Amino acid sequence: MVYRFAVDNDGQLSGKTTFIEIERGAGCPDGSTVDADGCIWVALYGGGAVRRYSPKGSLIAVVPLPCPNVTKLAFGGRDLKTAFVTTARTGMTAEDLHAHPDAGGLFLSESMFRACLSSALLSLEDVLYKNGAGVRLPLGTPRW
């Protein structure tokens, strides 16, 4: 489940309601971010994907990744349209790691979506490429 709260002027939360229900077997919601369209992206730990939901909570898109434990998606880069997706290796057996050698990696892809400015990673792309880190995730068509 992903919950929604009201926030008062003092920053206190109240009025907890269910915003998104993740079906059984699809993984657990982990890190999330909001894009410039107001849509919410949720990483699914154990689900091998990130999902995009409308501001009203309707599922719009599912982007699969080549490893099960997806932890976070963030947008950044010069134009705020580079998707950075982190994954984890924690708790995986040697057999799991053999089947998913990219687990624990950072995936990057150019996206047709743009960051909500307050959630952008403005300089991470430059740091990663100058240091030779990162993996490009080929997504094919349509681009996300």
Image (spheres, rainbow, N blue to C red):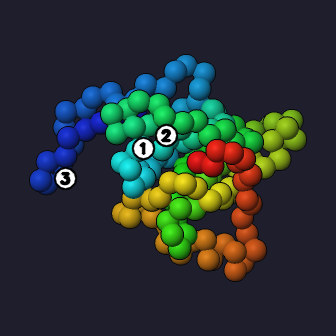
- Which of 19 and 39 lies nearest the eye of the viewer? 39
Does residue 75 sit above or below 129 in this rendering? above
Q: Position of residue 130 (x, y in %)?
A: 70, 80
In percent of the image, x 50 and y 54: which residue is there? 113
- Which of 93 and 82 lies nearest the eye of the viewer? 82
Question: Real-space Cα distance between discs 2 and 3?
Answer: 26 Å
Disc on res. 52: 2
Hey, what amino acid is under mark 2?
Arg
Please name the residue that numbered disc 1 is placed on: 40
Hey, what amino acid is under mark 3?
Gly
Residue 92 in view, yes or no: yes
User: In the drawing, does residue 7 fall left or right of residue 126?
Assistant: left
Hey, what amino acid is under mark 1?
Ile
Residue, far bottom: 130
- Which of 28 and 112 lies nearest the eye of the viewer? 112
Q: Position of residue 137 (x, y in %)?
A: 72, 53
Question: Real-space Cα distance between discs 1 and 3?
Answer: 21 Å
Q: Position of residue 37 (x, y in %)?
A: 38, 50
Residue, far front: 142
Determine whether the residue tagged by mark 1 lies in a helix, strand or loop. strand
Q: Earlier in the sequence, mark 1 or mark 3?
A: 3
In percent of the image, x 62 and y 40: which residue is there? 63
Disc on res. 11: 3
User: In the drawing, does residue 3 fall left or right of residue 1?
Assistant: left
Does residue 58 sit above or below 36 in this rendering? above
Determine whether the residue tagged by mark 3 lies in a helix, strand or loop. loop
**How crowded is the residue under tag 2: few (<14 C-alpha within 10 Å), some, or many (20+)?**
many
Residue 17: which quarter of the image?
top left
